[in-house]
Amino acid sequence: MKYSIKVSGNQALVFLKDKIYVRDASSLKNDLLEIINQGVTDLRMDLSGLSYIDSSGLGALVMINKRTVEKSGRLVLTGAQGLPLDLIKRTRLNNVFIVE
């Protein structure tokens, strides 16, 4: 998986590409929790380039969402399609996340 993070003030835009597996999810989670701890509270995650996400990836998104909410922020998922969107809906995480 490849991802990039652009931070501006208390906002960050995250672009996910390819696939998220266990190792990738851990790296992504650690990087995002670090920027949240530095004051970023509003995250916008672009999933349009993501073709696959496993349960560890979904777990990382849940943890990131939880931390942003604790900091009075929010996580918005955009561009989800195909299998990632299907898994978000099947697990009913679309009721947890803001999905656009």
Image (spheres, rainbow, N blue to C red):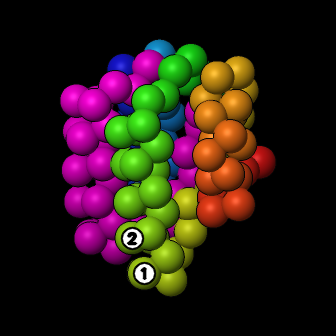
Indicate left or right for 99 with 67 as reference: right
- Pick the front one: 60 or 39: 60
Indicate left or right for 88 with 61 as reference: right
Query: Residue 44: x percent and y percent?
Result: 57, 52
Using the rendered view, name the quadrant where residue 22 is placed: top left
Can you see residue 9? no
Do the residues under discs 2 and 1 have CB atoms within 8 angstroms?
Answer: yes
| Residue ranking furthest to the front | 90
Query: Residue 80: x percent and y percent?
Result: 68, 33
Question: What crowding class fits label 2: few (fewer than 14 Cα within 10 Å), some (14-19), or many (20 or more)?
Answer: some
Of the numbered discs in the image, which one, if any, rests on residue 95? none
Identity, as a three-letter code, of the amino acid under mark 1:
Glu
Range of residues picked out in magenta: 19-47
Q: Which residue is drawn at the image coordinates 62% and 34% (left, top)? A: 87
Indicate left or right for 90 with 21 as reference: right
Query: Residue 54: x percent and y percent?
Result: 44, 30
Badge 2 marks a residue whose secondary structure is helix
- Pick the front one: 30 or 11: 30
Q: CA distance from mark 2 to mark 1?
A: 5 Å
Give the answer, above or below, for where 3 lies relative to 70: above
Q: Which residue is drawn at the image coordinates 38% and 60% (left, top)? A: 63
Using the rendered view, name the quadrant where residue 45 is placed: top right
Of the numbered discs in the image, which one, if any, rests on residue 67? 2
Give the answer, above or below, for where 1 lies relative to 67: above
Identity, as a three-letter code, of the amino acid under mark 2:
Arg
Q: Which residue is drawn at the image coordinates 44% and 69% (left, top)? A: 66
Give the answer, above or below, for where 59 lies relative to 16: below
Query: Residue 70: x percent and y percent?
Result: 42, 81
Of the numbered discs in the image, which one, if any, rests on residue 70? 1
Q: Is residue 26 magenta?
A: yes
Q: Is residue 33 magenta?
A: yes
